[in-house]
Every structure is written in C-alpha cells, then in structure tokens.
Amino acid sequence: MAFSNTDFHVNLIKNYPLIFLLDNENFLKLPTDHSPSQKHTHTQSTLQLQESPTCIDKKANKLFLHDYGDALSKSILFFEGQRSGKLPSTQRLTWRKDSALGDGFDKGVDLTGGYYDAGDNIKFNFPMAFSTTMLAWGVLEYGKTMGPELPNALAAVRWSTDYFLKATATHGVVFAQVGDPIGDHNCWQRPEDMDTPRTVYAVTENAPGSEVAAEMAAALAAASLVFKAFGDRMYSKVLLQRASKVFEFADKFRGSYNDSIGPGACPFYCDISGYQIEGSMSEFGWDSKHAGINVLVSKVNYILGDNPLSMSYMVGYGKKFPQRVHHRASSLPSIDEHPQHIECKGGTPYFLSGNPNPNLLMGAVVGGPDIDDSYKDDRVDATTSEPTTYINAPLVGLLAYFKAHSSR
C-alpha cells in the first residue's frame, strides 16, 4: 500500500494524538476514581479506568499544585540515566559511563546506543519505541513551552531514533532486542561492567513481528514531525523515509513477535493486546494507548506528592521520594567511586542492602504504591520500586503543559 507523506503520518499514528487534547477545551476530563494506579509490571502493561469522566474547570487552578517546571526537567534528565552506548560530552548524569559498545558486532551490525528499558541492562525495542513515540508527541505539542529544556528533550528523542535507524538499516530485518534477559536478570551488575550475553533478536520476513516493527515505524514517524517542527528538516526526512519502509515491512509480513523471538520477549514484554486488536478506550500502556490523557492527568499530582503518604514517586522531586530504586546502575557504586570490575554476582550485597542508592537517578518515576496507598521503599520489590522509560515518556508532554498553564 502506498502512502503520501501526509497520509502516512495520519494513518500510522492516528490513535496517538488523543493524549494531547488538553488545549482544545476549557476543561480537563478526569476519571471519577482517583485511587492510585494499578501495578505497572512488564507483563501487565495497561491501567484500567472507569468509563465515566467528570470535568474540572482548568481555570479554577485546582490541578496546578506543584513546581511542574522542576518535575519536567527531572523527567527528561532521567533518560540520560538509561542511555546505552558511547555517552556524549554533554552527559549530565556523570556517574553513568559508556556501556555495551559491542552490541550487534557478532552479527556484523552496529546496534550501539538506545535505552535500557528499566532497571536492567536490556534494550527491548518494543517498549523503547513506545517511549519514543510518547516522548516525541509531547515535544511536538509542547516543545515551545519547554524553554531551556527543549534541547534536552530533542536529544532524548534523537538518542532513540539514531539507534532505530541502525536497527532497521538491514533490508528484510528489524532488530527487536539486544541482550539475553534471563542471563541479565540473573546478575546485579553495572551496565559498564556487564559480561552477560548480548544476544541479538530480530524479526524477518519469515519470522515476522508486526507490532514491534510498526511501533518502531511510529516512533520514527512521530520523531520526523518533531525535527521538522524544530528546524532539522534533513534529519526529519531521513526518519520519515525509514519509517515508511519499516511500516511497509510490518504490514506486508504479518505476525506477532511473541512467536518469532520467543523467550527473548516473553514473559518480559509479551504483546498482551495483540497486533490485530484495536484495544479498549479504558486502557493505557506501552502496547495499548487508547485511553490517553484520561489516565495521565488524574495521576500527575498523585505521583508528585498529593497522596496519603505525602510522598513523591519521582526520584529527586520534593522532600520525600524513593531512595532504594530497583536499578542496577543507580544502586551500585559508580566507576568513579569503584573502578574495579563488578562481576555478575558481585553486586548482590548492594542489591540486598537497606542503604539508599549511591547514585541519584534523577527524575525516575517508580512503579508506585500498593492498592492501599502503602509503599515499602525496597529495591528487591521490582514491581513497586523499578522505574521505566515508558512510565516517564508520557509524562513529559503533560508536565510541559502543566508548567505552561500553572501560572494562569
């Protein structure tokens, strides 16, 4: 199927702009249930909403209770803590260093770069692509309100898309993941030290993965709009051309990556919704975006501290926030402090320690409290204490919106 550039954008990303409808009305729609979100786990990726919304007049200023500019800055900075590959001289979280510089070389390709998805050292391209799409739409809609954070937000998007260009450069192949999750999850090791298998997983014409390929195409297409809007038309054109080719591949060779790359994806990031399923308008997650803004608006102030514990679930924001985050690099001493190699099991004492993480993973939003609003600050409990790129990414645009409107 042939698309013009305009048609391609509209058809490829037609469901995504729902998240950014805030400026279209004088009210925000919130779910009637303001209870905390359900657990954010890899295998259960969606949040459930009640169907009937209530309307709160944004002019009443009831929603604007925090320093959203500070939260925005920190939410973008988090992505620097997740970087894989050769780090630039502009790296601000300096306790992170170069890592995974040989990714893909055993297959004759360069797959360095991209993001580790969470507290582990794996690059899962499906949730990474979702994160990139959400981040790109946030920058596209609210980049002009980000002020000095705009260059950092653009850099965060480009860190993904540069990697996706590498992952889709081979004809008939889309590289979907780097790293053996079983081996990685058996170790507590800094990304700079990791010596676990950097297994490369790919979807092909004979072993298709429509959802991961199409999501990567969506990320490239959304990012192309961002860079066109903010002055890099050459890079925008490169992204759009590649997005079109990758989407054509996803559409022509249909099948689920659940079946194609097997244990590489499942049970960690199975596509629960299915690549042929439209999804529910009451769900939002890395494999189902339909609920959009209705989920996020109702959770922002809760995340930032309007909750029974008066606790921020964003690291570094407010006076009280998680200290024992389930994150290898954050919980282990940095290369600067401990230059000696830490082997696979060498990090176990740090994992089990009750001490706060030595490296502040600024801006990381953790999985969050239990259903009764309780929170045990324990890095062993990954469900509650692990941050992910796909938690942070949708918040960036929303925080930029709140920042721009909080003084009105």
Image (tube, rainbow, N blue to C red):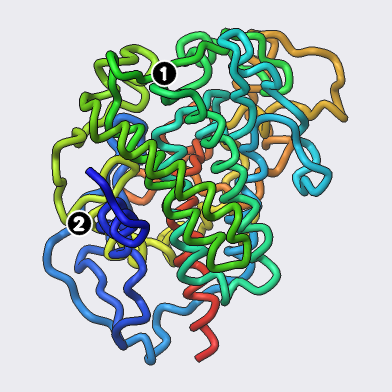
Kindly indicate the quadrant of the structure image that contains residue 127: top left
Percent position of residue 34, x then y: 27, 64
Q: Is residue 97 above or below residue 63?
A: above
Front of the two marks 1 and 2: 1
Residue shown at 54% from the left, 55% from the top: 236
Q: Amino acid at mark 1?
A: Ala
* Residue under pointer 2: 49
Q: Secondary structure at mark 2?
A: loop
Residue 27: give x, y in percent of width and height.
Answer: 29, 84
In the image, taking residue 134 as reference, residue 18 lies left or right, namely left
Q: Say which amino acid is labelled 2.
A: Leu
Q: Residue at x 31, y 45 (%)?
A: 285
Secondary element at image label 1: strand
Q: Nearer the viewer, residue 251 or 407?
A: 251
Up-down: is 45 above or below 148? above
- Looking at this view, is 72 or 306 the one in front? 72
Q: Residues within 10 Å of mark 1 (few under 14, many from 20)?
A: many
Contact check, label 1 and label 2, Cβ < 8 Å: no
Q: Is residue 176 visible?
A: no
Query: Quick check: 375 left or right of 274?
Result: right
Residue 67, position in %: x, y? 59, 73
Which residue has dot 1 on it?
202
Real-space Cα separation, disc 1 to disc 2, in angstroms: 35 Å
Q: Quadrant of the N terminus?
A: top left
- Mark 1 vs 2, N-terminal side: 2
Residue density around tag 2, few if under 14, some if 14–19, many if 20 or more, within 10 Å? many
Left or right of 298? Residue 219 is: right
Residue at x 37% of width, y 23% of height: 268
Foreground of the two, 234 or 391? 234
